[in-house]
Image (cartoon, grey):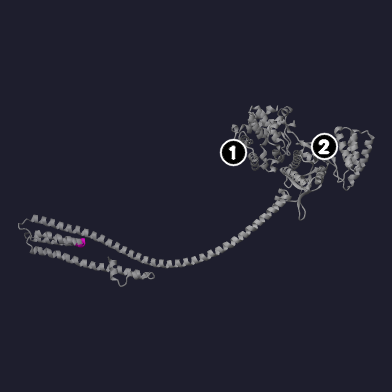
């Protein structure tokens, strides 16, 4: 090959000695070798051209020699095929054809001039045909063999050029590979050096990291110990706060949301009668034990009804309702807590009795003190509640008029004589007043009793109260001169009191003694007497204590709602002929169906206006919460749970897209839904008056026609109430 030859011819300057830093010199050497190969091929072409000339001359000379020296000329004419074929193999086709044509033309000329030289017996036609055939085959042989030769030469040349290019690429590849090896070697050295540097840096970094980790670990341990100390201190502080303050107050205090403000609250004062004598006659350890047991019984009741235990005053308790959290039904909560406290005292069989006084009104409430602070209330309401407690009968609860006006819907009370709010009172006069008030209750039209009460008020320097009773006596007996003179005299003094503010003078307050909770069946505006007599004993079948439900019903002044829903549901189930097991489940489900509404914000429960869609969604969650609450309390009755879960779903499915509808709703749930709606309409609420029974039933019938309630359940309720 040319490149190989060039390599051998230039062995004194081999390509392999070219360094990677001199690539241009190497390529120059390779180009020179290729050029030398091209010169060699040019010299070969000159030789071939000279050979072609001699070959043509040779054929002509051979033709003349055969003509002049060979006797059997026709026999020797086939000799020309050999040189012509050889010429076609090694020369170009044109030269081969030319070399064949010239002898043919020469022979033809000889045949024309001397045909007898080619035939022993002259036969020109045969001779001419023989010469033509011979000449044609000779020229054809020259053309065919020459064409094959030229094609072969072209292919060989193509292969030579490809081989030349391949060798050039191989040379360039070898050169690039050598450069790459040199560069790779340098790169490996650089990488090795860089790796060593990185290893050293990594080692230094690892050492620094280990030192840093040790420092961080030490600092973390210090911080954890500090955190533990802070947490322990915080726990101790919170424990100390919780032991001295209400949990709600502590939480608001920590969050920074405790404010000093004027607020309407109810103040409850309780005191033990006979405790001082008991403590004087009993060892101190027993006194402390019994006192702690008493407080342990009272505390849960007060907290259940959201009271804030302000302080313990020996055997006395001061508690605010409506603070620090503003519950709209704070007065009802205070009275219910007092009733439950007296019930607990009776059941616990303590060696003493308890008196409770409750007053409601505006007070200043907040943190009082400098370094040692307490959350407390200040104002006349506090003093009045303490006075009511002092005036209360042992084992009873005494409330003021402002409290009574709110709770009278649910509490049975007895009007007591007006209570003096003076710090110093005459016990004899107070007892005499109480006796006269009892006579007034027995004889309300006897003017003498009113006159005598007025005289006592005048005697103890309470002219305004005396004026009221003298006026009442004169109204009953206008012709009595004694009554007229007393009225005239007190009228003058009353005007003087209106103009002069006498220090220490306070008006008496109306007091009401709490007897107990009202039975909702006694409200004949809700049910007929026949219905009340027939189903009164059903309440005794309820096995769930009212202490579970009463605090929840106090949130929205719905006292007795659960009981009435349970009785109405039981009556409907009885009318429909259900089994005793089904009636019992429906009774208990109706009783506690709303126990989960404690999860609903209390301001929504007492909202007078309409609720937003978001607020309605919150309200709808309470049936599920009712089931959760019962489970937490240990109740496990899936039939009751199923009734409660669907007790607020509409019969036509409106309002509860994910709930059941129609007959798919359990029968007990449909019964409870109707009973719940009916009692809600006929019951009083702080934000509206109760509906008339007939109007409520008409509304239920209309809603049943619209598809909200099961019509057969509504019909059953109407029938049992007739």
> Left or right of 505: which side holds 709?
left
Where does residue 1 sit, x and y in percent of width and height?
A: 27, 65
Q: Residue furthest front?
A: 283
In depth, the one of 331 and 652 nearer the eye is: 331
Where does residue 607 sit, x and y in percent of width and height?
A: 70, 41
Going from the N terminus, do you reach mark 1 or mark 2 first?
2
Q: Is residue 78 visible?
A: yes
Say what secondary structure mark 2 lies in. strand
Q: Quadrant of the C terminus?
A: top right
Tell me the magenta residue range: 90-95
The quadrant in which residue 8 appears is bottom left
Where does residue 89 sit, x and y in percent of width and height?
A: 20, 61
Q: Is residue 680 visible?
A: no
> Left or right of 645: which side holds 284?
right
Say what secondary structure mark 1 lies in. loop
**Residue bearing mark 1:** 658
Q: Are marks 1 and 2 in contact (CB under 8 Å)?
A: no
Kindly report the secondary structure that dominates the magenta region of the rendered protein.
helix
The quadrant in which residue 357 appears is top right
**Residue bearing mark 2:** 415
Please tell me which residue is depicted at 18% across the width and 66% down the height of the picture.
53
Where does residue 56 sit, x and y in percent of width and height?
A: 16, 64
In depth, the one of 462 and 614 nearer the eye is: 462
User: Magenta stretch containing residue 172, yes or no?
Assistant: no
Please tell me which residue is depicted at 93% across the width and 40% down the height of the picture.
489
């Amino acid at each position: 090959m040319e490149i190989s030859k060039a390599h051998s011819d230039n062995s004194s300057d081999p390509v392999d000695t070219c360094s990677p830093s001199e690539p241009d010199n190497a390529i120059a050497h390779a180009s020179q070798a290729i050029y030398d190969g091209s010169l060699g091929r040019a010299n070969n072409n000159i030789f071939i051209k000279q050979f072609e000339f001699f070959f043509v001359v040779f054929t002509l000379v051979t033709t003349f020699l055969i003509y002049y020296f060979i006797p059997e000329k026709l026999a020797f004419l086939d000799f020309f095929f050999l040189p012509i074929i050889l010429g076609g193999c090694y020369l170009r086709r044109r030269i081969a054809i030319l070399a064949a044509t010239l002898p043919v033309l020469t022979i033809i000329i000889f045949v024309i001039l001397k045909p007898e030289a080619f035939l022993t017996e002259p036969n020109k036609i045969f001779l001419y045909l023989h010469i033509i055939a011979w000449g044609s085959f000779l020229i054809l042989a020259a053309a065919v063999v020459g064409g094959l030769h030229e094609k072969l030469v072209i292919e060989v040349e193509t292969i030579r050029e490809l081989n030349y290019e391949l060798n050039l690429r191989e040379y360039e590849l070898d050169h690039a590979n050598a450069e790459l090896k040199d560069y790779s070697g340098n790169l490996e050295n650089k990488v090795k050096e860089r790796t060593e540097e990185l290893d050293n840096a990594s080692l230094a970094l690892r050492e620094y990291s280990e030192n840093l980790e040790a420092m961080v670990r030490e600092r973390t341990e210090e911080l954890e110990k500090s955190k533990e100390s802070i947490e322990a201190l915080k726990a101790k502080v919170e424990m100390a706060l919780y032991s001295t303050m209400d949990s709600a107050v502590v939480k608001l205090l920590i969050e920074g949301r405790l404010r000093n403000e004027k607020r309407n609250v109810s103040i409850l004062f309780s005191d033990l009668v006979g405790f001082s004598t008991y403590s004087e006659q009993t060892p101190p350890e027993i006194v402390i034990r019994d006192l702690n047991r008493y407080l342990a019984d009272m505390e849960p009741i007060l907290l259940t009804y959201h009271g804030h235990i302000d302080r313990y005053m020996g055997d006395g308790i001061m508690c605010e309702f409506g603070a620090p959290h503003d519950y709209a039904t704070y007065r009802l909560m205070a009275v219910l807590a007092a009733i439950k406290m007296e019930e607990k005292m009776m059941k616990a069989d303590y060696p003493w009795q308890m008196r409770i006084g409750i007053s409601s009104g505006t007070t200043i409430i907040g943190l009082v003190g400098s370094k040692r602070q307490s959350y407390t209330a200040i104002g006349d309401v506090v003093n009045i509640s303490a006075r009511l407690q002092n005036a209360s009968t042992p084992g009873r609860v005494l409330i003021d008029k402002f409290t009574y006006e709110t709770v009278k819907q649910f509490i049975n009370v007895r009007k007591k004589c007006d209570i003096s709010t003076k710090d110093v009172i005459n016990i004899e006069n107070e007892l005499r007043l109480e006796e006269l008030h009892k006579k007034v209750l027995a004889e309300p039209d006897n003017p003498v009793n009113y006159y005598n009460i007025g005289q006592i008020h005048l005697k103890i320097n309470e002219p305004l109260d005396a004026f009221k009773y003298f006026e009442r006596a004169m109204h009953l007996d206008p012709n009595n001169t004694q009554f007229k003179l007393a009225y005239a005299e007190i009228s003058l003094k009353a005007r003087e009191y209106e103009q002069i503010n006498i220090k220490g003078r306070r008006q008496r307050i109306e007091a009401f003694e709490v007897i107990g909770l009202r039975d909702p069946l006694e409200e004949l505006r809700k049910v007929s007497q026949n219905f009340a007599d027939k189903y009164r004993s059903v309440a005794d079948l309820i096995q769930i204590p009212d202490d579970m439900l009463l605090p929840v019903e106090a949130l929205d002044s719905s006292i007795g709602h659960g009981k009435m829903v349970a009785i109405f549901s039981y009556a409907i189930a009885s009318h429909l002929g259900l089994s005793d097991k089904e009636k019992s489940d429906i009774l208990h489900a109706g009783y506690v169906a709303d126990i989960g509404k404690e999860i609903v914000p209390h301001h929504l429960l007492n909202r007078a206006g309409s609720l937003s869609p978001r607020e309605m969604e919150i309200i709808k969650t309470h049936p599920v919460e009712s089931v959760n609450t019962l489970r937490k309390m240990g109740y496990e009755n899936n039939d009751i749970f199923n009734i409660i879960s669907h007790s607020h779903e509409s019969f036509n499915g409106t309002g509860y897209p994910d709930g059941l509808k129609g007959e798919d709703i359990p029968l007990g749930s449909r019964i409870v839904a109707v009973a719940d709606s009916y009692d809600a309409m006929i019951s009083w609420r702080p934000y509206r008056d109760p509906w008339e029974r007939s109007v409520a039933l008409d509304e239920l019938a209309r809603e049943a026609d619209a598809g909200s309630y099961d019509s057969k359940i509504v019909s059953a309720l109407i029938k049992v109430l007739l």
